[in-house]
Amino acid sequence: MTNGFVAMAWAIAAKDLAIEWRTKTALVSSLVFAILVLAILYFARDATAVSSFEMAPGVLWVTFTFAGMLGLNRAFLLEMENRALDGMRLTKATPAAIFFGKMIGNLVFVGFVELVSLPLFILFYDVPIWTRLPILVAVMIMATLAFVSVGTLLSAMVVRTRFSEVMLPVLLLPFLVPPVVSAVQLTWRVLADRPLAEMTGWLSLLGAFDVVFFLLSLLLFEAIIVE
Amino acid sequence: MMPVDASVVATDVAWRVGYRWIIKDISLQVTAGEVALLVGGNGSGKTSLLRVLAGLNKASRGQVSRHGGVGFVAHHSMLYDALTGRENLMFVTRLGRGRDPARVDELLQQMGLTAAATQRLATYSRGMTQRLAIARALLDEPGVLLLDEPLSGLDENAAGIVADVIQRHRDAGHAIIIATHQLIELVDRATVVGFLVSGRLAAWEPIDGRDASGIMHRYRELAADD
Amino acid sequence: MTRRDKALRTARLGTFVTSAALVGVALVYVRALMFTPIERFQGPAQKIYYVHVPVAWSALLAFLVTGVLSVLYLFLKDRKLDLLSASSAEVGVALSVAMLTTGPIWGKPVWGTWWTWDARLTSTLFLFLLFIGYLVLRGALTDFDMRARYSAVLGVLALGLVPFIHMTVYWFRTLHPAPVVLKPDGPSLPGVMLVTLLLSVLTFTVLYVGFLMQRYAAAVLEDVREEEAAHGLP
């Protein structure tokens, strides 16, 4: 009996996370990077003219985006070191299972970085949002899903090129415009304690983006990993 | 439970990169109990042929059919440096027919890696990595074994282990293809030999009791004709 | 007829089409400058409209062609589709440069600012950057099958991205002149200006086709040379 789709995807994700946990290179780098960005952007303003509160939504998403990107590159570089991706292709794991596995691994990685930097963000930028946290977390999950779907596909692509570290941001950032702008708009409304009715537009845009790009990435992944 | 009808058959196979044909017009058949040696110089297309036979590279022309599942030992180990020997094998198991730790331990023991099983691959020597890569290929009990330079970097002891493994799988009815420069160690175990010259199969013939120097002589003859 | 001969014929035809379009551009401009009235509110600066809008149209057309050919490539795996789609992307990038330079020249006197984060401007900027990324990616891949597959994947993704980017920046805010031609209740542009604009759009579309034919012919010739070089090897 061959293992099922979910079991295989989970095995791949668990393997990625075990390796990451053991080496911690990307994880620690991403966290330190996130904290640095949060701190530097605090000073990147005229304190008498712009309050840190007004800047906060943008800062949060710039931080998440750039810190997350550090992790994405790592996911497929790992598969290239001893051509381990070939090894996976020789098993019974389908391209879809491989995509799912890598994506779940990335999701956990980026989610972890976000969860650690979120309290720091609340602390640094003095945004008292503890009561509205659930809706902010929901926004984070939706935006991260968008980021990681396209990111997983594109990182599988760029590891085969020269200069993959430079190539990933160039290709990925245009795709992050809709999710990141939506997330910033939503975060701004959450922080200002606006009613939910003012958020539905951006929420549905974000939701639609999630669905479309998750499916596209899943379908296109096979064309990336065959040789 | 050995698949008796294990075989790999290539019909008019060709593979190219860009407009360059790396291998061309390759037809061959290796069936249960046969061990084929692939002999050829650097760049003759041995590795590409094995990758096409394994299904890692899609043939640009022609067909490959495989029966009995394929185990592949490539030039790269296809393993993760940060995982231990045992974890590497367990991972592959999970992507296959379920998880059977007994099979993993049995293979680790066969390859003489039991003591090193809980060490990370990064600490392994070249020979240990190669043996683990072979164990990896054998995990799913494949009927077809494709080995790319299986003895490279191995000392006498490790080479002996690998040669025994090949012998045992041949006797058990596997179809085996080995691309190698190390004829002396392997020629006794082989039944057929194929000569690759500039991406073409210049000859495909029985070993017929020839030794390593006999095979090399024949190779030079064929290469000179090219 | 060999591939080389066909490509050379396409190149010649492309040169002819391009020349004809360039003559057309000159004629449209004579009409725009001398025989079309000056717009009441924007003054003479509005004349650049007759370049900016058509050039923007042909740039977007070029990217649309790349996207559609990318989808087709993934199904048909025909090498010609890949070369054509890459050629279209390159022409699109060139036309985008024209669009992104004429825009500010028009914007300065009319809006009083060189740049504004208006919806269409921003969308086209991102689209432009995305297709530069597309060309950079192609440059970084050496095996042509892989290059074709990967750039087709990116082309398909880009096709999916356009509506999202547009909606995002549109919701963010917009002050671009609202569409004046393609409106449900009919064009709101005075007749003479409309004719001039449509003639210009037509001319620039022909110009795009001419460029595309020439670029495609060059791509095929490059490909033929690569093929010959490969066969020359032992």
Image: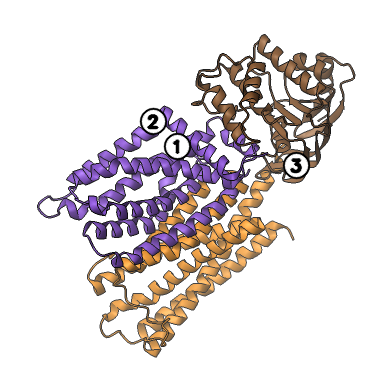
Chain colours: A purple, B brown, C orange
Q: Check chain identity for marks 1 and 3: say if they share one.
A: no
Q: Height in image: A102 above or below B180?
A: below
Q: Check chain identity for marks 2 and 1: say if they share one.
A: yes
Chain letter, disc 2 residue: A
Front: mark 1 or 3: 1
Mark with earlier residue (2, 1): 2
Q: Height in image: B177 above or below C44?
A: above
Q: Amino acid at mark 1?
A: Arg
Q: Amino acid at mark 2?
A: Thr
Give the crowd class for mark 3: few <14, some 14-19, many >=20 residues within 10 Å: many
Whole-percent x and y of residue C215?
56, 60
Q: For residue B106, what is the image quadrant?
A: top right
| CA gap, disc 1 and disc 3 | 34 Å
Q: Quadrant of the C terminus of chain C?
A: top right
Q: Check chain identity for marks 2 and 3: say if they share one.
A: no
Q: Are marks 2 and 1 in contact (CB under 8 Å)?
A: yes
Front: mark 2 or 3: 2
Q: Amino acid at mark 3?
A: Ala
Chain letter, disc 3 residue: B
In the picture of the structure, the residue carrying the numbered disc 1 is A74
In the picture of the structure, the residue carrying the numbered disc 2 is A25
Give the residue furthest to the right. B208
Is A98 on the left or on the right of C54, as rendered?
Answer: right
Q: Is B171 in front, or is C26? A: B171
At numbered mark 2, what does the secondary structure look like: helix, strand or loop? helix
